[in-house]
Image (tube, grey):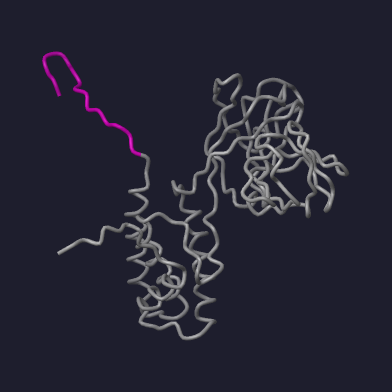
Amino acid sequence: MAVSGSKDFELDVAEYIEEAFERCGLEVRTGYDSATARRSLNLLFADWANRGLNRWTIKQFSQTLASGVVEYPVGTITATVAASGSLTVGETLTGGTSGTTAKIITKPTSTSLTLTVPSGSFTAGETITGGTSSASTTIAANPGLSDVQSTIDILTGVIRRDNSDISISQISRDTYLTIPNKTTTGRPIQYYFDRQIVPVLKLWPSPENSTDIFIYDRLVRVDDADSAVDTVEVPFRFYPCLAAGLAYYLALKRAPDRVQILKAIYEEEFERAALEDRDKTSTYALPTYTYGFTS
């Protein structure tokens, strides 16, 4: 017998919903059935965020610091522009009307730019100019902050100066509050991550130049399940956990007699997936010696 030769099995949102309903002994019959299941699926993703690290949701990001600027909103934004072709990745854009600045991270399409969080608000229709290329285009509107709001936490970070990375430590809100002079300048050695709806990174000391780069790993949200045809942003090893979790959430509303068994299956599947999701390192066993004995 021949094997398939394929390794691309993937479920979309509608298929996860169908699987979950079947585990509850039910069928998807109406549009409301699908809508309530998608709502439960998005709540399940929130539960995963509260349970700790999901390795596939760790994204590395870099923020070029500005001399004397202490606070930095975390993440990136997508801006719609008239044309992105002549602009250069890595250069800083400046709004001709607002004076707002932002750095270009990528150019996804001919009419869009991925930017660092702007220093202020761009004005709809204003001309933005690249600091390196001197190319100009117009921006359609002040970009939204959806990606910024996706950041759950910052895990670790370094300050890169002259191609050398120097560790920087995270401090608490209380510790940051008690720093007597937050405008002291120098190479930042500490940061406080203010986990608001739009999270903000606060550095100390205040950056002494505009060339240092803060490179950090951030934990981000899983993309929402907005449509039945969407695929779900989870790795293969989490497929059983997702199906089991959605079935449990639906049982709370539609099949109360199956709640306990489906909850137990979900917890077992999550534990198995989370165990496999850990970082792995080499392990060495060394003997210990005491006088006259080896163990």
* Residue extending farthest bottom: 29
Q: In this view, does 109 lie above or below 118?
A: below
* Residue in front for this viewpoint, 104 or 21: 104
Q: Residue 46, image x and y in percent?
A: 52, 59
* Residue in front for this viewpoint, 121 or 93: 93
**Magenta portion: prevailing SS class:** loop
Magenta-drawn segment: 280-295
Which residue is at a point 69% across and 44% down the rendered structure image?
85
Q: Residue 62, image x and y in percent?
A: 60, 35
185 with respect to 114 (left or right): right
* Residue extending farthest front: 86
Quarter of image, res 280: top left
228 with respect to 204 (left or right): left
Which residue is at a point 65% across and 32% down the rendered structure image?
175
Q: Residue 97, image x and y in percent?
A: 88, 44
Q: In this view, does 31 lie above or below 210?
A: below
**How many discs appear?**
0
Quarter of image, res 292: top left
Is 290 magenta? The answer is yes
Q: Residue 141, image x and y in percent?
A: 78, 54
Quarter of image, res 209: top right
Q: In this view, does 202 lie above or below 82?
A: above
